[in-house]
Amino acid sequence: MKIVFYGAGNMASAIFIGMIENRVVKPEQIYLTSRSQQDKVMFFKENLGVNVSYDDTELLDDADYVILASKPQSFPDVAKRIRPYLEEKTKIVSVMAGTQIKTIRRELRTENPIARIMPNTNAMVQHSVSGITYSRNFPDKDQLVELMESFGTTVVVEEDVMHNITAATGSGSAFLYFIYEKYAESLMELGFSEEEALFLTRNLVIGAGKMVEDSELPFSQLRKNITSKKGTTEAGLNALDGEGIKRILTATLNAAANRSEELSKDDE
Ligand SMILES: NC(=O)C1=CN([C@@H]2O[C@H](COP(=O)(O)OP(=O)(O)OC[C@H]3O[C@@H](n4cnc5c(N)ncnc54)[C@H](O)[C@@H]3O)[C@@H](O)[C@H]2O)C=CC1
Ligand SMILES: O=C(O)[C@@H]1CCC=N1
């Protein structure tokens, strides 16, 4: 199998590192190309043993999958590189937020099978939750799912649901990291030093993550197990609820999903 990544940034590297760590593909089956960050790309070549090339003829020769992993705004340039050399057998897989299958088809001027996937950078530790949507003519869906399950779990959705998946899990980890950042800052306001605040937050998050992983209990029960009647947790939770935590999160997710829709309209 030959898998070619156009773009070797944060998302692409999380995917190919996840795939290689899980031994679902060998490093020599992976080809990288980029526009910027050439040092980083050479680092991957030297440390992982993947191939690097800037020659589109070589890259696209007999490729099984081309992964579109640039920013949506760079896609017209990427398409220009790919278009002349794309072979009929090559399946196209896009990770770009908001770029629709019909746009990819139009820019590449191809009838080749296309899938869109929306992973997240937790792929690097094999814990991405990835949405997938396919063009009607996509063959071997199981093979793509198997590749993707090497770096996490998958959900197959209709294309219009990808906006919400992008918000929920594509961007989702960033929302959680932001909450952890603010938690640490608030600990500093309580009087902890920066180092202490980061240490406490980091270990709190790791512990809570492991509880979520290991326990069969729903989030609500995990919360209730900590909350004593008229105790400290109840006091804190009442304040959190009073500040409108649910409203804040709903606004966050709506803003991200709306931006995905906007991106999909930019290219119409
Ligand atoms: N970072 C994330 O958590 C996620 C990102 N995505 C999507 O993944 C895509 C990439 O995002 P990041 O990896 O964060 O961006 P990045 O900026 O880290 O990487 C972009 C890559 O595209 C390459 N590139 C740009 N123009 C090119 C060209 N003409 N030919 C070849 N390569 C070219 C750059 O050299 C770079 O390696 C975006 O479309 C984004 O919507 C999707 C899910 C999550
Ligand atoms: O911020 C973005 O647009 C990309 C898509 C999901 C995560 N990062």
Image (spheres, helix red, strand yellow):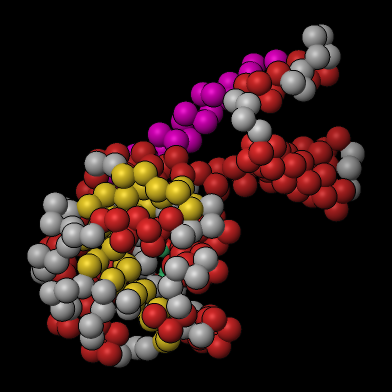
Q: Is residue 258 visible?
A: yes
Q: Residue at x 29, y 42 (%)?
A: 157
Query: Is 216 left or right of 38, judged from the image as shown?
Result: right
Residue 46 shown in magenta: no
Q: Is residue 146 above or below residue 251?
A: below
Q: Is residue 50 above or below residue 214?
A: below
Q: Quadrant of the N terminus?
A: bottom left
Tell me where residue 4 appears, x and y as whole percent. Answer: 34, 76
Give whichever of 110, 78 is nearer the camera: 110
Q: Is residue 97 visible?
A: no
Q: Which residues are magenta?
A: 238-262
| Ligand 1, image quadrant it occupies | bottom left
Q: Residue at x 32, y 50 (%)?
A: 132
Tell me where residue 162 appears, x and y as whole percent. Answer: 31, 44
Tell me where residue 120 appears, x and y as whole percent. Answer: 47, 54
Query: Is 246 left or right of 144, judged from the image as shown?
Result: right
Give whichever of 125, 239 is nearer the camera: 125
Q: Residue at x 10, y 65 (%)?
A: 111
Q: Is residue 267 above or below residue 255?
A: below
Q: Quadrant of residue 114?
A: bottom left
The mark total stands at 0
Q: Quadrant of residue 167?
A: top left
Q: Is residue 239 above or below residue 193?
A: above
Query: Is 205 left or right of 17, judged from the image as shown?
Result: right
Residue 243 shown in magenta: yes
Tell me where residue 150 appears, x and y as whole percent. Answer: 46, 60
